[in-house]
Image: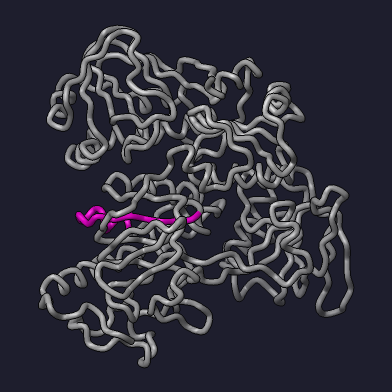
Amino acid sequence: MNEAVEAKNASKNASQNGSMAAESGLGTIDTRREQMFPKLTTEEIDRIRRFGEVRRYAAGEMLYRTGETAPGMFVLIKGRVAIEKRDPLGHAETIVEMGPGDFLAEVAQLSGGPSLVDARALTDGEALLVSPSRLRALLIAEVHLGERIMRALILRRVFLIEAGTGGPCLIGPANHPNMVRLQHFLARNAYPHAVLDPAEDRDAQALLKHYPCTNDELPLAICPDGSILKNPDEFELARALGMVSDPRDRHYDVAVVGAGPAGLATAVYAASEGLSVSVFDARAFGGQAGASSCIENYLGFPTGISGQALAGRAYVQAQKFGAEMMIPEEATTLDCGAQPFVLGLRGGRSVKATTVVVASGARYRRPDIPNLQQFEGRGVWYWASPIEARMCRKEEVALVGGGNSAGQAAVFLSGYAKKVWMLVRGTSLAESMSQYLIDRIKATPNIELLTCTEIVALAPSPDGELQAVRWRDRRTGQEIEKPVRNVFIFIGADPATGWLQDCGVALDAKGFVPTGTNIPPDHLRSSAGIGRPQSLETNVPGVFAVGDVRAGSVKRVGAAIGEGATVVPQIHTFLENITAAPATQPLSAAA
């Protein structure tokens, strides 16, 4: 028996909590109906015909189901179709009925991903089926029509995220570390999910009786295909949801490792210029910038934009041009011994690429605090999303760090917390933070800045959660303990370059990747017939580095995006040079 059916018998009516949308402020199905469901004219449908093929279906036929790969976008010519949301417990509800002139698709259809809704024919009908590759061609070829379709696709995904429809149902205590971990992973990847807390929901209690779990096995994840996972890691959950495809034995023009601003910009510009591009990231698109609550000094956004919204737009844009997004997919090794390069992936799999762009960014730095790791996910956080912020309502929190990321997080958390204690080791914020954030922190009454201060101890509650924090004034030695249950740490990051070990790519003393004229002379490759490294090229011809991982880079979103755009002409130069090089000449020589 399908386990989803058994779960349905155990629970008749599951409540759902909407997750963070990919872009806030876009409204609901009622306020944005015309943009979510634009009606195509007969003339517009005729223009789409060259991109699709006619399909006929009978009343009652399923055009696609939740969790299964949809064949593409359906443009209805005749008949009516019901779009239904179905949770993993088997409950179905009609979202909207669609007829001639409507089209059936959302963002997943750009890349051939699994459907998040059911499409059921109410009558006999006829439709144009536009495959994912042809849909991308349509969006590019038909500018104004493509703009309407693309906006509808995005708004539909936002609606599904807010409704918690089409993804897994996570069952467990709201503050359980693994519950928070998976919610954060799904939210950062703009993937719909529902949440049930057994402390508040009888259905969740019934489900846990039906599928008993120890505390270490929580949360229970029920996937749309009926599979039941106990405390899965992110990779296991993503595989069960069909979020990533297997790139094995593929050969790309460009492999981008890292989906932060630099990596996403590289993907957008490279794919838009006709190069085959794959993007790999072990966690989520957006990188550290994706966790920023509001970026106010990015050009063109005078009122600011969240890192999640900015990255979400770039993520969809890259797919529009055909870039393949492999998230979560971890790069573990790089073999630069010959062309094409071989990028090793988790589980022993690999892909080949003629060029590689290192955009793996940096990993959160941990301060030297006793027992810190014990509280990670149990009160110690390295980001500040709405998920963590809701856990801090009307409480005092501590925030460590004096850079822009710390300032943005402090202002964001001040809207939830009773008080934000901002702890900085230095004497002021002026050396490391933009003035507009300094002014805003001063103007926020429930943020208190403590300079020359550091945390010296963390105390647990009986159940192992963080319960109290003690910090010390480095000038006087005075120590103070506060009943703080959540600490947010923003003290910079170390380069994520472990996967480059033993591949020949030079690293500086701190682990960053030098490029161009910053490469030490003793690390320059001998003649490869390609000349000296370009400004964003490493010592290995054909391997480039952009963004925070690059030695000497400016740690700003705008600079990272600029490097992502700049590296693409350099990739073209490399590709042209190796095409023109004699076949007998090696592409790279030993260091």
- Give 534 or 240, whichever is nearer the viewer: 240
Left/right placement of residue 329 relative to residue 585 reads right
Q: Position of residue 571 (x, y in %)?
A: 24, 68
* Residue furthest front in the image: 1
- Give 231 or 143, whichever is nearer the viewer: 231
Q: Residue at x 38, y 27 (%)?
A: 36
Relative to residue 243, is residue 499 depicted above or below? below
Left/right placement of residue 193 relative to residue 246 reads right
For the question of whether residue 420 can be seen, the reply is no
State which quarter of the image contains the C terminus. Answer: bottom left
Q: Is residue 275 magenta?
A: yes
For the question of whether residue 186 can be seen, the reply is yes
- Give 303 or 347, whichever is nearer the viewer: 347
Q: Is residue 513 magenta?
A: no
Q: Residue at x 25, y 18 (%)?
A: 76
Q: Position of residue 46 (x, y in %)?
A: 13, 24
State which quarter of the image contains the N terminus. Answer: top right
Q: Position of residue 392 (x, y in %)?
A: 74, 46
- Give 5 or 353, whichever is nearer the viewer: 5
- Res. 89 image quadrant: top right
Q: Position of residue 326 (x, y in %)?
A: 39, 50
- Res. 545 image quadrant: bottom left
Q: Residue at x 51, y 53 (%)?
A: 283
Extent of the magenta region: 267-282
Left/right placement of residue 438 relative to residue 91 reads right
